Each structure stands twice: as structure tokens, then as C-alpha cells.
Image (spheres, rainbow, N blue to C red):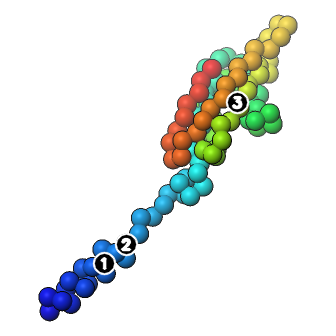
Amino acid sequence: MKNTLFICLLTLLFSCEKENKECETLSSGTLEITNNTSDRYDLYLNTSYHSTLQQGSSNSLTLSSITPHNIWVIQKEGFIIFPTEYQTTVSITSCETTNWAF
């Protein structure tokens, strides 16, 4: 009886595997971008157009955590001569949220 209980206990302990979160499997995390201005901005991710950020809004992007990402926003309206631009490089950590506000 003791042997059977011991074998059952060992089987139970060693048969359990840790379940990976999807973000761990994909090596991805979240970038939360916040537009604190009163104008709309076009968002470029690694030199490619991604979307337009509305004034006073936030946008969440799921990005790879393997390499850094170049983020560039350019004012779409409300400028007199030249649009305002903001640029940064962010490194994403798997399963975590990185914030960037302008």
C-alpha cells in the first residue's frame, strides 16, 4: 500500500509541466503608446507606417522582444510650417508592458 501511494505521488509530481504563456512562446510583449497632445500623429514602426494616433489617446501594440524597435511619430495636422516629430527606440520585455508617451 505504501509503495503504491509513493509511486502515485511520484507520478503526480513529475507528470506536471509548467504551461507557457503565449507571450513567452512568441517572445512578445506590449508597447503602450500615449498621445498627450491635442493633434493627431502618424505612427511608424521600424520605418513602416502603422496607424494614426488620435489626440489624447493610447494604442497598444504587441511586439517581438527579440530585437529593439524604432518608433517614430509625426504630427498629421495643426502645424504651421513643419510638423512636430518624436522618435525613440524601445526594447520590449516578454510578457510585460512598456510605456511611451509624447
Q: Using residue 1 as the reference point, say whether residue 95 is left or right of it.
A: right
Residue 16: which quarter of the image?
bottom left
Residue at mark 1:
12
Please give the label number shown on residue 71: 3
Residue at left 14%, top 92%?
1
**Amino acid type of disc 3?**
Ile
Residue 57: which quarter of the image?
top right
| Horizontal and vertical percent position of residue 71 | 70, 30
Q: Secondary structure at mark 2?
A: loop
Establish if 75 lies above or below 67.
above
Q: Are marks 1 and 3 in contact (CB under 8 Å)?
A: no
- Rounded to the nearest angstrom, the CA distance separating label 1 from label 2 is 7 Å
Q: Nearer the viewer, mark 2 or mark 3?
A: 2
- Rounded to the nearest angstrom, the CA distance separating label 2 from label 3 is 41 Å
- Rounded to the nearest angstrom, the CA distance separating label 1 from label 3 is 48 Å
Q: Are marks 1 and 2 in contact (CB under 8 Å)?
A: yes
Q: Residue furthest right?
A: 81
**Amino acid type of disc 2?**
Cys
Residue at mark 2:
16
Q: Using the image as rendered, state which of residue 33 and residue 27 is in the foreground.
A: 27
